[in-house]
Amino acid sequence: MPLRIPRICTPWLCRGYSSPTAPPCPPPPTGISNISRFRQLIEIHGPDAAQYLQGLTTRNIPTLSDGGGSYSAFLNPQARIQRTGKVLYDVFIYPTNNNYFWRSQIAKKNFQPIRHPTTKKVFPLDAPGFFIECDIRSADALLDHINRYKLSSKFDCRLIPRGEWDMWAIWDDRRLLPVGAGDIGCADIRVPYLGKRVAVFGGKSIGVEVDVAVYNVRRMLHGVPEGQDEILNGGNIAQESNIDYMGGVDFRKGCYVGQELTIRTHHTGVVRKRVLPVQIYRPGDSVPEKLTYDPNLDLAPSLPGKNPNISNLDGKGRGVGKFLRGVGNVGLALCRLEAMTDLELGGEKDKTVPEFKLDVEGSELRVKAFVPEWHLMGSAIPLAQRNSEPAHKTIVRRIVSD
């Protein structure tokens, strides 16, 4: 089935910035973006590939009959260094066996000309094959992580160079975008109407492209963290990075590396911290009531250092969050829910959320956190809705200590 591309309205496209650091324009309602500048593909192929990945990732590996891929994560197994179950790599995993171009590549590698020296063949076409999409800066480390536990498992894995296969993000705010039967990719179900992701062979363009920075703005406005800048390597459990809310953890799955902490946290309470979208504003500006991206405010890139803390205006008390990454006047931060939101996390009384600032010397920038609507499908309830909840729907929660 040919790849269907949504029609793009060209006036929304970003072109001709006066500065390479200028914030991108607001995301259009439909768009196509080549995300290969920040995302890397790893190929794994062999009889034991599916079983091996099943024991390392937080979701069940898609079967070849399913066709579509899934969002998942690799967790930390090193108990002596830090607690097990911390997220190492957030990934998408795509089956490849139904794709014509991938099958042609494998068949070409296995072809043995007559009266020529025999060369090593790759595994048969019908052996399970997958693409693993990850942050480009952590690709080498993830490849080493996969090979470290390979032992006698029968599969090959390699980094796919850019231009051989490229990853594209496609979205349409008005409808769901299914993936074709022969395509390598999946619907991006992390957030409703986030779109789909497709691997394209041969470095070909599939439409009029929107800059990848626009894709990142749209993702941040939805509160979706991605990559090692926003999902800190070995720093947070899956729930703190919203991987559970985004469908990246199957709590009914059997044993996998790092499962114990993830399952225990799920069944014994809620976490204190989660990654939330935030808006940065200047002193004297009114406190934003709704998350709004303004390309004319270049506030986030001017922040020195990495991951500055978020604190109370008076600077007293413990930090309430950590700024992760931003574009223009919006970004993502790891926030303490009790402090930075009005969410109920154990029966607190109604409260007014105060203002907070970025803990950066010489800066007085303010930060306001917002809870996306799709978070409310999880375990937290806004305090404003508490009094209207029927008694039989009251949720009793225990706070999981850090």
Image (cartoon, helix red, strand yellow):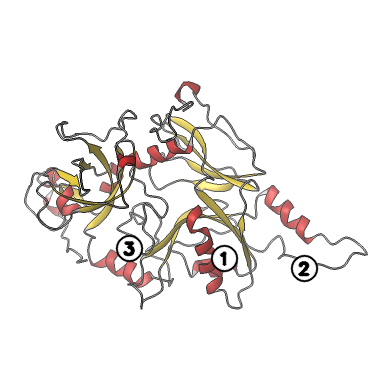
Q: Name the residue under label 1.
A: 50
Distance between the alpha carbons at the discs numbered 2 and 1: 22 Å
Residue that mark 3 sits on: 237
Residue 135 visible somewhere in the drawing: no
Query: 163 or 357: nearer the eye?
Result: 357
Mark 1 to mark 3 CA distance (whole Å): 24 Å
Q: In which quarter of the image is the C terminus?
A: bottom left
Q: In the image, what residue type sits under mark 2?
A: Lys
Residue at point 33% right, 39% down? 221
Amino acid carrying label 1: it is Ala
Q: Residue 66: name its quadrant.
A: bottom right
Instruction: Specify whether 283 is left or right of 181.
Output: left
Q: Which of marks 2 and 1 is nearer the N terminus?
A: 1
Q: Nearer the viewer, residue 52 or 159?
A: 159
Residue drawn at 37 percent across, 49 percent down: 225
Q: Rounded to the nearest whole Å, what is the CA distance between mark 2 and mark 3?
A: 42 Å
Residue reaching furthest to the front: 362
Could you tell me residue 393's position as x and y percent? 17, 52
- The residue wearing badge 2 is 120
Q: Of helix, strand and loop, which one carries label 1?
A: helix
Mark 3 Cα-neighbour bin, 10 Å: few <14, some 14–19, many ≥20: many
For numbered disc 2, what is the local secondary structure?
loop
Q: Establish if 252 lies above or below 92.
A: below
Q: Is residue 215 left or right of residue 342?
A: right
Amino acid of disc 3: Ile
